Image: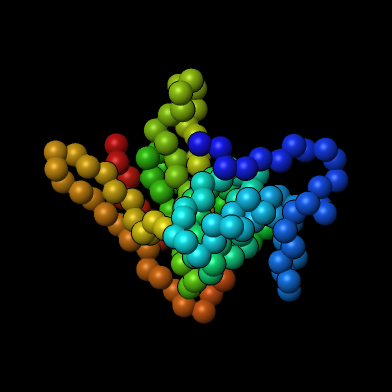
Amino acid sequence: MLLDFMVYTGDMSNQLVAVPDCEFLMSERIPLTFLQPYQNQGYRLFVDNFYTSTRLAEFMSENGTTLVGTVRPNRRDFPTALADVAIEKGEAKFAMSDNGVLAVKFRSHKDKSGKKTKIVYMLTTCHPNALTQRRHLHVNVHAAPKSSNLKLRDMSLSPAPSFN
C-alpha cells in the first residue's frame, strides 16, 4: 500500500517539515515529513543508511515511533569506538545510549559473493541489546549493559558471543 510520495524536483526544503529548535539534515527531514501524520501512534520506521542517524532515531523515539535502519559508520554521532573496533566473523558489538538508541556492528561469516565478509552497522530503538541464535531450541544471548548519562558516541562496547 502506498501512503504518500514526493517527486524530487531540486530544492525541496520548502516542502519538508521543519522542527522548531532542531536543525535536521535534509536526509533526516524527508522521513520526518512522511511520518508526521503517524507519530505517537506506535508505528515502526525502517530506513536505509541514507536517512538513518542517531538524532533521527532519538527524535522518532521521543515522538512515539520506533526506528530500525542501517547506518553509515562515519555518520555524525555514530560511536567511533564501535565503528573502529575489530570484530571476528559472526561476531557483533553493541553500544547503547541512555535514551534507548542501540548501535550495532555485525560481521557476517561471508557475503553473498563469497569473497569477503560483510560488516553491517545498524541503529534501532526497538530491539534489545543482545545477539541471539537459535540452534536445536537453545538460545544464546549476550546483552550489553545500559549506561546512563552518556551520549551514544561515548558508549563503551560490549562483545557478543561468536557463532561459528
- Asked if one can make out residue 40 in the rendered structure from this viewpoint, the answer is yes
Number of numbered discs overlaid on the protein picture: 0
Name the side, left or right, on which 106 lies relative to 3. left
Quadrant of the drawing holding the C terminus: top left
Name the side, left or right, on which 27 lies relative to 57. right
Find the residue positioned furthest to the top. Answer: 113
Residue 32 quadrant? bottom right
Residue 54 coordinates in the image, percent (x, y): 59, 60
- Asked if one can make out residue 153 in the rendered structure from this viewpoint, the answer is no
- Identify the coloring: rainbow
Q: Residue at x 14, y 38 (%)?
A: 136
Q: Residue at x 73, y 71 (%)?
A: 20
Residue 144 quadrant? bottom left
Q: Residue at x 29, y 41 (%)?
A: 163
Q: Nearer the viewer, residue 125 or 113?
A: 125
Residue 43 coordinates in the image, percent (x, y): 46, 55
Q: Residue at x 26, y 44 (%)?
A: 133
Name the side, left or right, on which 70 lies relative to 160. right
Looking at the image, is 18 positioned above or below residue 149?
A: above
Q: Nearer the viewer, residue 119 or 25?
A: 25
Looking at the image, is 164 positioned above or below residue 112?
A: below
Find the residue positioned furthest to the right. Answer: 11
Residue 159 coordinates in the image, percent (x, y): 38, 56
Looking at the image, is 129 positioned above or below residue 149?
A: above
Residue 15 coordinates in the image, percent (x, y): 78, 51
